[in-house]
Amino acid sequence: MTRQTAKKAATGALIGLALGDALGFPTEFHDVPSILAKHGPWRRTELPVTRGTAYVTDDTQMTLALARAVRACDERGVASPERLAATIRREYVLWYHSPDNDRAPGNTCLRACELLDGEGLWQDASQIHSKGCGANMRVAPLGLRHLYDERAAGAAQLQAALTHGHPTALAASDLTARAVWLLAQGVDPTGLVGQLRSYAYENRDRYHERWLGDLWTRSQDPSAGHFIRRGWDECLAVLERLDAVQRTADPELDPCEYTGDGWIAEEAFATGLLCFLLFPDEPLTALRRAACTRGDSDSIAALAGAFAGAHLGADAWPEEWARHIEYRSELLAFGALWDV
């Protein structure tokens, strides 16, 4: 039995992501003074429950869309990049048309999915200049299987590229899934940033052509290598900022002051990770801190929840919170699938 199986890391990560999403739903688009005035001290924030349900946003909805696509491909054996792209595309388009898609989804996701709902190449639907956090808020399922290799990295970048084609969106999605995987495998949080920096340097010149095709030609870059290096270099810059403050950051200060507001992929990754690293053994405190931020609070808190849950497992989350979460049954089903 692996550590991931024993602690039920997949269940912990998926429930944590949804809890963070629900906790940050009411605070997104508000600054910290406004959040404190309405919700009280951040360390005592309670899960917002309406008629017995803690509602989530498009962050969790799109995570589930990706999870469905991954499961569908896994059931048929090792998926080719083409089949995985087609399956994820179908799930994203279904989400786009869903009547439940009414949780203030991002414009990039909406525009790309509108274009994906057709016969054209997915690369032509991709919003090549967008690196919004919609690229990596949903990527956790690809870090929850037992192997994170070239295929997993390519898939993490592909799922981002279907909507967000900027190279930083691709690199940040790869890093986010890699972080989830490392934590699920039992990596010590104190060494996590160093491992992620090494991973970024190792992959800085690797363009996953099998997975991305000629996506890079839609940019202004002179080569595929130049294209992908831009993304990794921006992610390395935010990792350096995170490394510099992870042990000295004041937990009472808005984490966005250190690593950015989270509207873009590399900042959502770094600020969500910072919230987790501030409280690696206090998952609810990490979520509360992430939700009380001036930036994209639901995405920051969703990522913090995925990291905390991957690290601590299903027992990280009290039942009095977890039992209220929207889509709970489906989240638990995917958790059970990937916990074994």
Image (cartoon, rainbow, N blue to C red):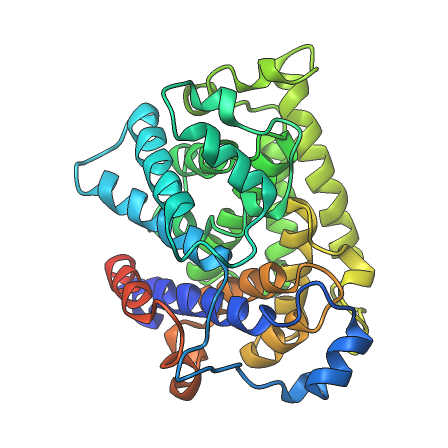
Please count the marks in the image.
0
Q: How far across and how far down the image is residue 154, in percent?
A: 44, 32
Give me the residue at 46% from left, 39% from top. Answer: 156
Q: Is residue 22 above or below residue 45?
A: above
User: In terms of image quadrants, where is residue 293?
Assistant: bottom right
The picture places residue 35, in percent across and down from the top left corner, at 73, 77
Q: Quadrant of residue 226?
A: top right
Image quarter of the N terminus: bottom left
Q: Is residue 272 visible to the viewer in this orientation of the structure?
A: yes
Tell which of 242 and 186 is nearer to you: 242
Q: Is residue 251 visible?
A: no
What percent of the width, then of the height, locates residue 176?
54, 49
Give the side of residue 183 with respect to residue 7, left or right: right
* Residue that sits furthest to the left in the current view: 76
Q: Residue at x 32, y 36 (%)?
A: 90
Q: Is residue 19 above or below residue 47?
A: above
Q: Nearer the viewer, residue 151 or 30?
A: 30
Above or below residue 193? Residue 147 is above
Task: Please state which of residues 219 and 91 is positioned toward the viewer in this rendering.
Answer: 91
- Residue 276, image x and y in percent? 61, 68
Q: Is residue 64 above or below residue 339?
A: above
Side (left or right) of 93 relative to 5: right
- The quadrant of the image that shows the C terminus is bottom left
Which residue sits furthest front? 99
